Image: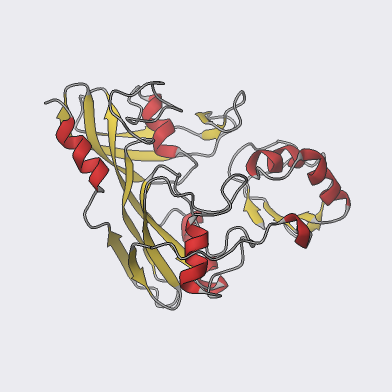
Amino acid sequence: MILLVEDDYNTRIDRWISDHVEDLSRSYIQTLIENGNIMVSGKNIKSNYKVCEDDEINIMLPPDREPEIEAEDIPLDIVYEDDDLIVVNKPKGMVVHPAPGHYTGTLVNALMYHCRDNLSGINGVLRPGIVHRIDKDTTGLIVACKNDKAHMALSEQLKVHSITRKYRAIVNGEIKEESGTVEGGIARHPGDRKKMTIDNYRGRPAVTHYRVLERFKGYTYIECQLETGRTHQIRVHMKSINHPVLGDTVYGPAKCSYRLEGQALHAMVLGFNHPSTGEYMEFRSDPEVPVYFSELLNKLPK
């Protein structure tokens, strides 16, 4: 398993890993470090090592620590596929990769069945093919890689922020301006390690551009384009300007006036240079937004 440090700089490595890998306890991480199973940029470290920006952490887990993930015949909405990659339109409620409490029914389980043994192995047995993630209750486009060469090429594009990602969202409140940009470093929340927060000192720089598509009474329909891709970026940035995403009970109101399963957020456009040909390819979900999203737009008061 290879992890890239994108937040929480100057944090002890054992704590950093325990915050980012849910199924590893801090004491077990310390044992792994002592046994040389965790390295940073190819070097052995101690448990008190403090992570730096862009550190590459290689975690080599003993085989019996990771459960066997089974391929499952789960239908996939495939937007594009070739020998190097596959672009899928992920439904609401589907977890991207296995984790405690979600070892079945994930996108990875479905990809393993569809692609057989043709998935990259860079991110370990729990995340074969997975280059980037979108939240469980966020719908839309995600790309997975079938070999390590393609995986490394797309990972580099993610690192330099050259991948096009446009989202549709419905947010609370009426945004007055026609467009805008939110800038603010995003880091792990100090009081709740499952949440993210704006922190320009500890956080990774993050930029979200948005434009208004339609206004409703008490709500705004917007398009967001990511300049960077941090965890929960749109959700955290929209909360920071007092317009949390509708249905987001983590960063917005605890109660929602509409029956939603999670936030009204959809990854509509995904574009990148093909890892083999170098040709720029851009994909758009069809329809642009899923049924739950369009039905919600029809219900909002004008």
Residue 294 sits in quarter: top left
x then y, percent, for residue 91: 36, 51
Nearer to the camera, 239 or 87: 87
User: How many badges with numbers are in the image?
Assistant: 0
Residue 153 at least partly seen: no
**Measuring 52% from the left and 74% from the top, which residue is drawn there?**
116
On the rendered structure, is 144 left or right of 36?
left
x then y, percent, for residue 81: 37, 72
Type of colouring: secondary structure
**Measuring 34% from the left and 65% from the top, which residue is drawn there?**
78
Quarter the N terminus occupies: bottom right
Q: Which residue lies most toward the front here?
A: 73
Q: Up-down: is 172 above or below 210? A: above
On the rendered structure, is 25 left or right of 157?
right
Nearer to the camera, 145 or 298: 298
On the rendered structure, is 167 left or right of 219?
right
Residue 259 sits in quarter: top left
x then y, percent, for residue 225: 32, 45
On the rendered structure, is 199 left or right of 244?
right
Residue 204 sits in quarter: top right
Q: Which residue lies most toward the left here?
A: 302
x then y, percent, for residue 56: 67, 54
**Measuring 47% from the left and 57% from the top, which residue is drawn there?**
107
Quarter the C terminus occupies: top left
Residue 161 at least partly seen: yes
